[in-house]
Amino acid sequence: MIEEYSYGPVCELRLNRPPSNLFDPALVLTLTERLRAAHSGGKRAIVVSGSQGIFSGGTDFGAFVGLDVDGIQRFVRAFLELQYQIAVSPIPVVMAITGHSGSAGTVLTLFADYRVMARGNYRIGVNEVHDGVCAGRIIYGALRRLLGARKADLMMCLGQTVDPEQALSIGLVDELADVERVVLAAQDHAVALAKLPPKAYGTTRQIVRADLIKLLDASARKDACDEIVESLRSPEAQATLRERQARN
């Protein structure tokens, strides 16, 4: 589910839930635990990567089948906690977006320190609205922080996805690399961050990320959980879930 590799001061956590690295409760919890463990193990930076051609297809809506309200709330709270762990990580997190990245996959990248995406015929975006789901205020705040108000408004409301070059031009990602080198490029950036003077870099990083972390305080996570759970229980979202279940 998660493959782990070590490169000197850098830990790589590679999503490995074929075929599309969809996030179910187990993957969410495992990635959260591995992120926490990387720092306690003495690493200075983390790379999160996917499979070649696919970073993550998003949320595994099949995981909601049979869940009651409490079960849905647990899943949403766990996913918000994963976002929080990326945002407050005491060491930088670099995303190696190895291909397509939809909904939940893109959401996680918003809270990282740096994003490298593969060039090619891939799409990335916050497209939950097409599933009948409102992504919520935290995700909007994080997206707006990167893109600015108008571009974030359009991506959220229309469920837009963009290609890698467009993602770079609007600030959704920071760098492009050939698909076979995207993980290496992310590792190189992570190593460069790990070599910076730790005290000066750490203090500066806290300053520039304070607004991001504020988005995810306990009260905001509770409010976001409530609004996302309500959205997931809506007739629109339930219809989408049933359609996907029927296709599978």
Image (tube, rainbow, N blue to C red):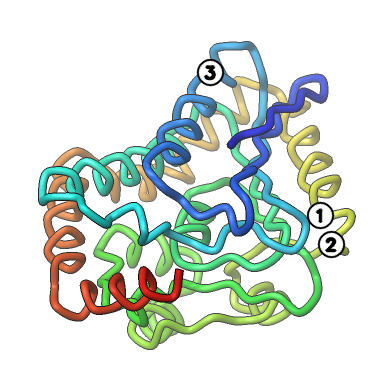
Q: Looking at the picture, how far across and down is residue 68, in whole percent?
A: 12, 50
Q: In the displayed structure, would residue 18 be above or below residue 190? A: below
Residue position marked by numbered label 1 in the rendering? 182
> Pointers 2 and 1 in contact (CB under 8 A)?
yes
Q: Residue at x 64, y 43 (%)?
A: 16
Is 75 placed left or right of 112 in the picture? left
Helix or strand or loop: what does disc 3 sit on? Answer: helix
Residue 32, horizontal then vertical, whole percent: 45, 32
Is 207 on the left or on the right of 183, as rendered?
left
Residue 51 % position (x, y): 72, 52
**Which of the marked residues, 1 or 3, is nearer the chain's N terminus?**
3
**Which quadrant, please, contains the C terminus?**
bottom left
Residue assigned mark 3 = 37
| Nearest to N terminus: mark 2 or mark 3 | 3
**For this rendering, which residue is in front, 230 or 107?**
230
Mark number displayed over residue 179 = 2
Q: Amino acid at mark 3?
A: Ala
The residues bearing labels 1 and 3 have C-alpha atoms spaced at a distance of 24 Å
Residue 75 to residue 230: above or below: above
**Label 1 amino acid?**
Val
Is disc 2 in contact with disc 3, using a CB cutoff of under 8 Å?
A: no
Q: Residue at x 29, y 50 (%)?
A: 215
- Out of 237 and 200, give the one closest to the viewer: 237
Q: Helix or strand or loop: what does disc 1 sit on?
A: helix
SS at mark 2 in the image: loop
Q: Residue at x 65, y 21 (%)?
A: 198
Labelled pair 1, 3 in contact (Cβ < 8 Å):
no
- Indicate the quadrant containing the N terminus: top left, top right, bottom left or bottom right: top right
